[in-house]
Amino acid sequence: MKVLIMAGGYATRLWPVTKDHPKALLPVGNRTILDYIMENVKGLGLETHISTNRFFEAHFRPYADRYGVGLVVEDTLHEEEKLGTVGALKRAVDELGLDDYLVIAGDNIFSFDLQDFLKHYNGNPLIAVYDVGDPELARRYGVVVLDGDRVVEFQEKPLRTESTLISTGVYALPAKTVELIDDYLGDGNKDAPGYFLEWLVRGGAAVHAYRFDEYWYDIGSADSYLEALKTLLKENHVEDIHIGSYAKVIPPVVIKQGSKIIGRSIIGPYAYIGEGCLIENSDISDSIIFGKTVIRNSTIWRSIIDEKCEIRNLELKKSLVGGHAKIQRGD
């Protein structure tokens, strides 16, 4: 079996923050999304590869070197050129060879141990499923109906559903199933893993489910990104920074090196401040601020601000600000 982490998307739902940053490398606390996945994968002792695109290849190369894993690069530079997830999986299999594959979505943060997941793998497709508890929320994903651990019905993004059990982005696929990808794509089906699984179940394949609890985050929106931060950030990670005598830090927070927190500023709880930021007379909580950003006389709550921005004299709530933006209200 080989492990394949799918990180080739352009994450348009999180633009402009992900326009120049691959989603899998976004920070969640003091680690990236990919770090959480790789720390879970490394205990498996399996050959591992990351699938990405030409545009983000340079971002992933240092991570591949650090973890000693391979990199499979699809030759695309823009969203409109992008292979779908199933197409990217086929591209990787063509390069790496036919095998059983543990496929993991690169924007996925989950609570279960992959070693335990693979203990339930019996040579038939195995998917990780999670109860989101809300039918309206479940309709955004692949909805699963089980008989024991056997998937008897799979509906990708249904209009209506009674079930709140959904398929997450972790799949163990045997070689016999991987071989069917050509047939699936050749029939003109949608190039998405949920529709592939629906096609398998509808065709009578024995697809099984591994059910887990605690937490799961598909980092597809600002809300899910910030909720993941609140769940996973448990303690302070404060590096070599300057904190003024009137500033206050309320844990848990991450403040990266070279940042300055001055004036009557309050940072936290649940705040990420990137390298080289300047925060003056401002309150920041439940928010992620990327590096080299200046914030003065402002209140930031449940917002994401990209790098090299300047925010002055503002109250920002539930906002998403792209890189190099300059926003201020008159004094």
Image (tube, rainbow, N blue to C red):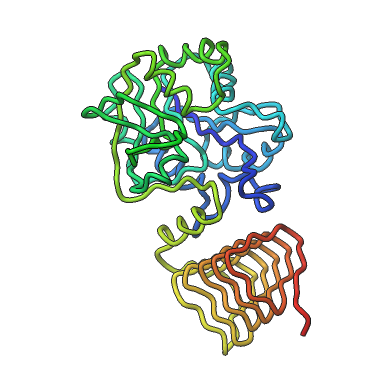
Give the quadrant of the C terminus.
bottom right
Residue 116: x and y, percent? 28, 36
Residue 85: x and y, percent? 55, 28
The answer to whether residue 108 is above or below residue 101 is below
Outermost residue toward the left in this view: 148
Give the quadrant of the N terminus.
top left
Count of labels in the image: 0
Residue at image x 36%, y 46%?
132
Residue at image x 71%, y 72%?
311
> Observer-nearest residue: 80 or 96?
80
Residue at image x 52%, y 10%?
183
Outermost residue toward the bottom in this view: 246
For this view, does 122 lie left or right of residue 100? left
> Observer-nearest residue: 118 or 129?
129
> Observer-nearest residue: 110 or 244?
110
For this view, does 252 lie left or right of residue 118? right
Q: Residue 228: name its quadrant.
A: bottom left
Residue at image x 60%, y 87%?
264
Q: Residue 203: name its quadrant.
A: top left
Residue 313: x and y, percent? 70, 79
For this view, does 189 lie left or right of residue 145? right
Q: Residue 233: name its quadrant.
A: bottom left
The answer to whether residue 331 is above or below residue 125 is below
Outermost residue toward the front in this view: 160
Residue 292: x and y, percent? 70, 65
